Image (spheres, rainbow, N blue to C red):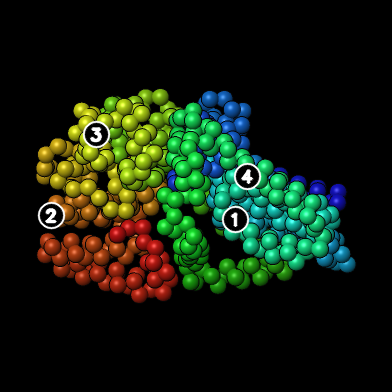
Amino acid sequence: MKRALLVSFGIAVFSLILYAFCIAPSVYWEDSGEFLVTAKNLGVAHPPGHPFYIVLSHVFATAGSSLNTTISINFFSVFCAFLSVFFLCFTFFSLADKFFNGVDKRSIVTAVISSGLLFAFSKTFWYYTEIAEVYTLHMLFVILLFLAIFLFYKVEKRFIFLFSYLFGLSLSNNITVIYLLPAFLIFIFLKRRRLNRKIILVSLLLFFLGISFYLYVPIRARFNPVFNWGGASSLKSFTSLFFAQEFSRGFLTHIYTERSIFPFVLNFIKELSYWGIIPFLWGMVVCFKKDKVLVSLSPLFLNYKRNCRKGDYDAFNYGNALQKWISKDGIFLTENTNDFFILFYLKEFYPGCDFDVLYLPLFKVDWYRTLLMSEGFQWKGELTPFSLLEGTKRICYYTPGAGISLPVQYLIPWGPVFKFVEREHRFFSPIENFKLPEPEDQKGKKRYAILFSRFGEYYFKQKAYILSINAYEKAKKYAPYNRYVYYNLSILYSKIGDLEHSIENKKISDRLKKNFLKKILDKHPFLH
């Protein structure tokens, strides 16, 4: 047992040092900005609220000074990853002790070290260890649940109490752990002889005690914190948040799994190239023969460049570039979650961003309209960007999401954003009149590709084909494997009579479409 603890701790500390070295110094893309804001202010995040993560990360936020609050919150993910690696290795030792008792101890230690390192620096897990996200805490809970159910099976039946409490508590961090419940229930059912009514009753009580952490949401919502998604102070609004009714269209489907697995596999193959796979596999075989533990470090070298966030200010710089084009008392409307969370983060963490940030997809939701009214916004009839514009004398700005949903004749390009105008307008501002800091991260490149594609769409609708071509050419720079960019360029070049470039782009689009690997990516395009 002592050896198991020491080896597990050693692997976890090694991982911790690497994670801490690579920690993100600022906000990252996707949900990072939201979790940084909610952790700092004890807010309520997007459905289902993630209360346990918010409270624990708030402890880390208050532990650091005001100058490094962001890093302190990001470090909470590092800490959860450290514990995940430790308990995973300890679980492996426990399994080996029970099922492989006759195996050489050195072989077991080698196997555990290799497994621990492969897990610690795997692309998906490492991706979330250095930013404000719920997934490292989620993984910690999953590992602890498997450890608890194993201890229930092999050591003591009362470990079912620990399992029940942890399962309820894990739901208050990330509700997707519910997908493991059928497997756990089947296992418990097969071992039901070890249970009696008293144990089952106590287990249920502990489960509800764990999930009762969700009471944080309605209690905190009544205080109207800075970020209060759902306004879940009533039973109706709380159940809506808990069951993620706003996202229910895809909540119980496998689409998110498809989007996660296929891009990772395809990007890995694409980076190696077909010829690169041969020496890679040969090198793996040679390393395996010489030192099996050395092979387990391969994910560290393969994923370091992509997953190390040291000095990564891409999202921060992008947000700064946007807010420089927004007037001091303006209203920023967006359909893009990256823009919404990043600018909300800047507004909260950096004084001087004196404009409001509103999320257009929530305009049809009751709680969001109530929130806007409480903040002094006024409009007549149905809440739309234009009714909001009529009810205020403030300047409004806009960034689209998957496509421009607003009439383009009431929008003009204003740097990297669009500006609302009250009357129909055909003023074209070339995209060369602003510069964005070059992103190094793939998420940043993806956001830039979407941004310039939306400008291309705008100019196309305004029949300014040359400007549209310029915009899509910029999008192509950041998304060179997206066939829709080439397809749009082929149409645009044909519009101006440049058949040579039109045919060239059409051929590239068709080639990408026919390619077997790209076909899988085409099922989930991020550009249209």
What's the residue at 80%, 58% (across, down)?
Answer: 195
Whichever of callouts 4 and 2 sits on the residue coming sooner in the sequence is 4
Identify the disc placed on residue 249.
none
Under tag 1, what secondary structure?
A: helix
**Few, some or many residues within 10 Å of mark 1 (<14, 14–19, 20+):** few
Question: Does 351 sit above or below residue 156?
Answer: above
The amino acid on which the numbered mark 4 sits, given as a three-letter code, is Ile
Give the spatial CA distance, label 4 vs label 2. Answer: 56 Å
Tell me residue 508's x, y (percent). Answer: 29, 69
Q: Are marks 1 and 2 in contact (CB under 8 Å)?
A: no
What's the residue at 19%, 43% (across, down)?
Answer: 411
Whichever of callouts 4 and 3 sits on the residue coming sooner in the sequence is 4
**Few, some or many residues within 10 Å of mark 4 (<14, 14–19, 20+):** many
User: Can residue 146 be seen here?
Assistant: yes
Which residue corresponds to mark 4?
211
Q: Nearer the viewer, residue 202 or 432?
A: 202
Question: Does 240 sit above or below residue 219?
Answer: below
The amino acid on which the numbered mark 2 sits, given as a three-letter code, is Lys
Which residue corresponds to mark 1?
178
Which residue corresponds to mark 3?
379
Tell me residue 311's x, y (percent). Answer: 50, 40
Question: Which image quarter holds the C terminus?
Answer: bottom left
Which residue corresponds to mark 2?
463
Give the spatial CA distance, label 4 vs label 3. Answer: 40 Å
Whichever of callouts 2 and 3 sits on the residue coming sooner in the sequence is 3
User: Can residue 417 be seen here?
Assistant: no
